[in-house]
Structures are given as structure tokens and as C-alpha cells.
Amino acid sequence: MLVERGADLYQINRAVTKFGMPMGPFRLCDLVGFGVAIVTGTQFIENFPERTYKSMLIPIMQEDKRAGEATRKGFYVYNDKRMASPDPEIKKIVQKAREISCVNVDPKDIVEMVFFPMVNDACRVLAEGIAVKASDLDIAAVMGMGFPPYRGGIMFWADSLGSKYICSKLEEWSNVYDGGFFKPCAYLAERATKGALPVRILKLIWSTLVERAKSRL
């Protein structure tokens, strides 16, 4: 979505790796192959159509015989040692995908536009009882998707920003980009409306009260 709305894909990768991820989303897509991206994307479209963005970028790239690192040509081009280099020709392909939109993305929003939807989905997982604790999602994010450990995990990082701020940004983007991809889930929206304190602050307050109660016994 960000690329089709004007952001430079290599700038997105740099922003995400600077944030602390092992690699950017487009380098990762090249690594696993476009086939995996298409199958995964199809599953999301079929099961969550109201909040899934259907990108035209991958299909257009496939028409150009690009399939990722395995074919030495994807979002990057690869030499005999599989070293990645930006591909100047990618601009023509991106331009085709951008013809559907005239809205531009502010570069300073890149990291938040990548990770706030993840926070939104993590809130859904908590609300549906799939995960019992926010810390479980933190561990899953660090161990499963390479979320930078020094940021504490996806929910710990979200707590540091606050639900009100995250919800307001998602609502802003949802209005600008006209779709459900950025729409805050009910769990996040409710916490933002109530001005709920971050989960870890609540736990800290509770543990402090418990310790004080114990000291009086």
C-alpha cells in the first residue's frame, strides 16, 4: 500500500531496518519468494476482506518475470553470490501500480504505518482470547517475526506510545486512504476513548498495591 501511495520501497526497507528489524518487508518478500506472498495475501483477502489491502504490485511484477531471490530478480536484483542491489527498472513497475492512486505518503509516517496495523491486529488477538497476555504477543513478535528485542515487543512498544495516539493515527489514515485496512478495531478504539492506561502501567500499579498490602499484613 505505501509504495502504491507514493513511498519509495527502498526507503521503507531502510526505515524498517533502522527501527530494528533484521530486514525490510520487500527484501523479506524476495527471500521467501512471491509465491508465498501471493498465497498468504489470498488467504487474508478471503478471510478478512474488509481489512485487507489488495495490492496490484506483485501481479505486475510477476508479469515482468520477477519472483524474488530465487530468480535473481524481485524488488532487488541479485548477483551470483545472491547479494542484493536496488533495481533502477523497478520504478517503471511501481509507476503502473501507482496509477490507481494520487495520494502521497509522508516519509516520516513510514514506520508507524508499517507497525500500527500490526498493533491493531494484536489487539484483536487479545480481544478474541487467542492470546491471554500482551507479553505472549511480545515474545511471539520478537521470536517469530524478528521484532527488535530492545523495543520490548510489539505490545510493549505500543504501550510506550499510548492507545490514544495509535488509534488517532489509524483513524486519520483510514479516512485518507478510504478503506478498512487502517480502521482501529473495537478493542483499541475503546481503550483510546476511555483513556485507558497502557497494560504494563496497570500491571505495575496493581503489583505495587499488592506489595503494599502484603507489607501491612
Image (cartoon, helix red, strand yellow):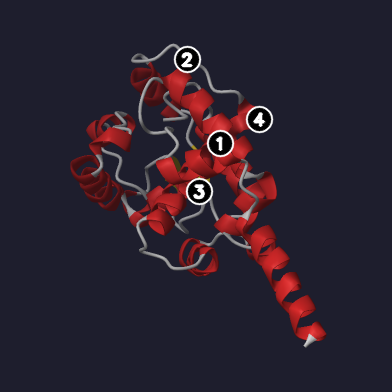
Closer to the chain start, of discs 2 and 3, is 2
The quarter of the picture where residue 48 lies is top left
The residue that disc 3 covers is 119
Chain-order first, disc 2 or disc 1: 2
Q: Which mark is residue 103?
A: 2
Q: Which mark is residue 193?
A: 1
Residue situated in front as seen by the camera: 93 or 123: 123
User: What x and y, as percent, mark residue 42?
Assistant: 21, 44
Mark 2, mark 3: which one is toward the viewer?
3
The C terminus sits in image quarter: bottom right
Query: SS for tag 3?
Result: helix
Q: CA distance from mark 2 to mark 3?
A: 24 Å
User: Going 69% across and 59% down the picture, which residue do you hit?
Assistant: 201
Q: Amino acid at mark 4?
A: Lys
Which residue shows up at 23% across the image and 31% down it?
63
The image quadrant that residue 167 belongs to is: top right
Q: Which residue occupies the extreme top position in the image?
A: 102
Of tags 3 and 1, the one toward the viewer is 1
